[in-house]
Image: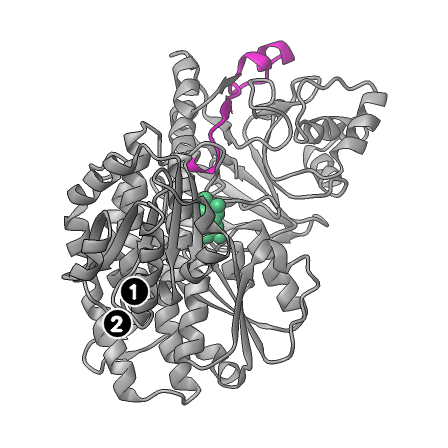
Amino acid sequence: MCGIFGYVGSKEAPKILIEGLKALEYRGYDSAGIYVPLNNQQQSTQQQNRCIKAVGQVKNLEAKIPADFKGNIGLAHTRWATHGVPSEVNSHPHSDCSGRVWLAHNGIVENYSELKQELIAKGHTFKSATDTEVVAHLIEENLKTIADFSSALKATLNTITGTYGLVIIDANDPTKLYIARKGSPIVLGIGEGENFVASDPSAIVPHTKKVIYLNDGEWAILQAGSYQLFDLAGGELKREPQIIEWSVEETKKGGFDHFMLKEIMEGGKVIKNTLAGRLDENTLSIKLPELLGVEEKLKNIKRIIITSCGTALYAGWVGEYLLEEYAKIPVECEYASEFRYRSPIVEPGTLVMSITQSGETADTLAALREAKRQGAVIVSIVNTVGSTIARESDAVIYNQIGPEIGVASTKAFMSQVALLTAFTVRLAELRGVTTTEADKKVVQEILDLPAKIESILDSREAIKDVATKYAKYNDFLFMGRKYTFPIAFEGALKLKEISYVHAEGYGAGEMKHGPIAMIDENFPTVALCPADSVYEKMISNVQEIKARSGRVLAIATVGDQTVSKMADETIFVPEVMEMLLPIICVVPLQLFAYYIGTGKGYDVDKPRNLAKSVTVE
Ligand code: G6P
């Protein structure tokens, strides 16, 4: 939520900053701003001219930057509004009264209201409605009694409460970027004679693969040729950069119109990459070496709780079905945002799993911390290496799929479900509740998945035609049972997110308890009825809809004429064993949502009001 990018070196900062913001734009895009001081000290009036802001996407900001706007250090921000409407005055960077302190912020300063009143009483004048501006004025206030900028910053950090990823420039010494973190992600990029800071490593990868993640309560100073890390008491910390594996190509669209389509089309590759090194084709077995340190505990766990948000939560729901059926262990999967506030009881012997693409989602992190406080073992499925949730877990299974840029999650979901399947088989083995033959069958079917996914992707033009027919409807119901139950919710979520159409996921068995009342010829149902153990029940539910003049788009197993005769339209998917149905069935629904959203002319990579990494509650 909100993207920050900072640069210090010898190159032209504005261009690098704008490129950095574009890479981070998925985090928020209602307004953007940039601050680039000249290399020598400036008067405050001149400093105001060094800050440019624009409402809307980064391209609007880029268009406002004059050719002679130059400098070798700067900071930039793309915003997802929390306090104050999207406007130039509320967009970052913000400054103090004198124009000496300039900063960009991600997070929420919770005590900003009291601090603002105190600062106004001391004569400070505020321009914006944001919580962030208070930080600039507080540093200015502290500089009245503390000569040294670092010490004034430290005093400020010890006064503000809430969450922050902050990047700050002192215009009196425009050679340094000051960076601080509490609760909001921030990562340093260490280059040769130049350094970077960003909210997400994907923006840094084009420049350097050496990164340092700041932990909560740490702050740093970056100069062109050096970096220093400190704790809040002022003690210096020593930390070597780690190397990030993502390639630059993974951060580009690669010829597709949208990242979302590119990421859906990567489906087959995603399954292969996710399971690379984890699935032995010769012995048809699963290895998860990252679990070695917790395996003894896993053998004895009595219960699993999965907590996540959004699409990752629906992956967790699939996990619940998989783990209970195959690994024979009680599982609950719940909204992280509810888990943390409902006084959960985490008994000894509980494994808590956080599933998260970004590794930074505020509610997922808070749920993890609550579970940890109560003594749970934490195993997480995370895509972003080194992210906060990865660092705070006892064991991490990484997705190995490169960055996901489209705001609506697609490839991460496929990968999360694939890992949950692998984890299920491994846990069943550890608990001694499976046979080698049964495991081999699952592994063989997983190995066949990429080709099956490709076959669905190859039929995307047909799915586009179906989407075109359904684009006129304003309400949709998605229904499934057992393994397709979570997919009904995920299909509805995808459609809501990128086409702004009302869509509800429902368990097919629940239809008669309410939703069926809404069904008429203007309220189509997407019915997930592949060949599985609840197929007959689904057929009955489809009949009930047809009997009420409801239009039905069915997802069915290739060759199923019973369904195709009954439904108005049918999208066929290849046959797979029941526990792998979620991975196969979600693909046409991702494409269906994509084509409806793009058909309406929306920017599906940056849906309105949403952000990819939700670092506020
Ligand atoms: C946001 C994104 C979703 C994502 C959810 C959880 O809402 O728009 O696509 O599923 O956050 O994100 P996480 O990074 O924890 O998987």
How far apart, in angstroms, are the residues tagged by discs 1 and 2?
Answer: 7 Å
User: For the residue with label 1, is its CB less than 8 Å from the closest atom of ligand 1?
Assistant: no
Between 606 and 49, the residue placed more toward the observer is: 606
- Tell me, yes or no, whether the highlighted magenta stretch contains residue 46: yes
Q: Which residue is found at the position 43% from the left and 29% from the top? A: 17
Callout 2 secondary element: loop
Where residue 492 appears, x then y in whole percent?
40, 47
Q: Quadrant of residue 437?
A: bottom left
280 shown above or below 22? below
- Residue 351: x and y in percent read 55, 74
Q: Which residues are magenta?
A: 26-51
Q: Which mark is residue 306?
A: none
Residue at the front extreme of this rendering:
547
Q: Local crowd at mark 2 within 10 Å, few (<14), some, or many (≥20)?
A: few
Pinpoint residue 432: horizontal percent, then vertical percent: 41, 90
| Residue visible at 51% across and 30% down in the picture | 77
Between residue 98 and residue 571, name the one nearer to us: 571
Residue 455 on image: x %, y %:
15, 55
The answer, for residue 452, to whether it is visible in the render is yes
Residue denoted by label 1: 581
Name the kind of residue labelled 1 in the image: Leu
Residue at left 26%, top 63%? 530
**Magenta-span inclusion, residue 288:** no
Residue 280 visible somewhere in the drawing:
no
Marks 1 and 2 in Cβ contact (< 8 Å):
yes
Relative to 447, 63 lies left or right: right
Q: Which mark is residue 577?
A: 2
Q: Is residue 25 above or below residue 482?
A: above
Q: Residue 116 is drawn in which quadrant?
A: top right
| Left or right: 237 as drawn, with respect to 146 | left
Q: Quadrant of residue 242?
A: bottom left
Callout 1 crowding tier (Cα within 10 Å): few <14, some 14–19, many ≥20: many
